[in-house]
Image: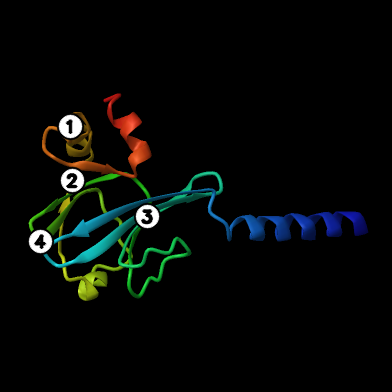
Amino acid sequence: MKNKVYLLNFLIFTMSLSSCKFDHVEKVKIFNQISKETIYLKYYTWGLDDEMSVISLDKKTEWPDSSKDYVTEGGAFFYKLQNDTLFFYGVWYASKLNAFKDFKTKIVFKELHNYESIELCKTYKEKGLNIFPPSWSKFAKNF
């Protein structure tokens, strides 16, 4: 019985350590020449199926600051910087919609239905859009 308690404590400790570390991080840097502002798109995965995407002014890849960063629960999205506006296209599950108060760049979200996202996977390059995270481009071309 004592060994089972030790084993259980070890497993809980190990799982808590693994939840503090990201398995995979992707980052894209977008520079707005008009506002002279750099925006970072960050994608994190950990565990079996946990993921999140972050839009931030902070280049660090540590855990996002939910008071300043826009955090959404995973999934790919499309984006385009046009003039002084950064457009995002995707299915949004946001933690904070007013996170952009410190941004100089205007941020516009276009929410898509699933079928619209699938169609955009086929034509996003023709429309001058980028996909985020970049690793998802290999999935998009299979639609």
Q: In this figure, which residue is indicated by the disc labeled 2?
A: 112
Kindly state the secondary structure of the residue where label 1 is placed. helix
Kindly state the secondary structure of the residue where label 3 is placed. strand
Q: CA distance from mark 1 to mark 2?
A: 10 Å
Q: CA distance from mark 4 to mark 2?
A: 22 Å
Q: In this figure, which residue is indicated by the disc labeled 1?
A: 119
Number of the front mark, 1 or 3:
3
Foreground pick, 102 / 38: 38
Quadrant hosting residue 136: top left
Q: Work out whether 113 lies above or below 12.
A: above
Relative side of 13 to 136, left or right = right
Whichever of labels 1 and 3 marks the residue nearer the N terminus, that label is: 3
Does residue 1 appear anywhere in the picture? no
Kindly state the secondary structure of the residue where label 2 is placed. loop
Number of the front mark, 4 or 3:
4
Q: Residue at x 25, y 55 (%)?
A: 30
Please state which amino acid type lies under the numbered disc 3: Lys
Whichever of labels 4 and 3 marks the residue nearer the N terminus, that label is: 3
Please state which amino acid type lies under the numbered disc 1: Glu
Please state which amino acid type lies under the numbered disc 2: Leu
Q: Are marks 4 and 2 in contact (CB under 8 Å)?
A: no
Q: CA distance from mark 3 to mark 2?
A: 20 Å
Q: CA distance from mark 4 to mark 3?
A: 21 Å
Q: Residue at x 65, y 60 (%)?
A: 16
Which label was assigned to residue 42?
Answer: 3
Q: Are marks 4 and 3 in contact (CB under 8 Å)?
A: no
Whichever of labels 1 and 2 marks the residue nearer the N terminus, that label is: 2
Does residue 136 appear anywhere in the picture? yes
Label 3: how many Cα within 10 Å (few below 14, some 14–19, many 20+): many
Label 2: how many Cα within 10 Å (few below 14, some 14–19, many 20+): some
Which label was assigned to residue 84?
Answer: 4
Whichever of labels 1 and 4 marks the residue nearer the N terminus, that label is: 4
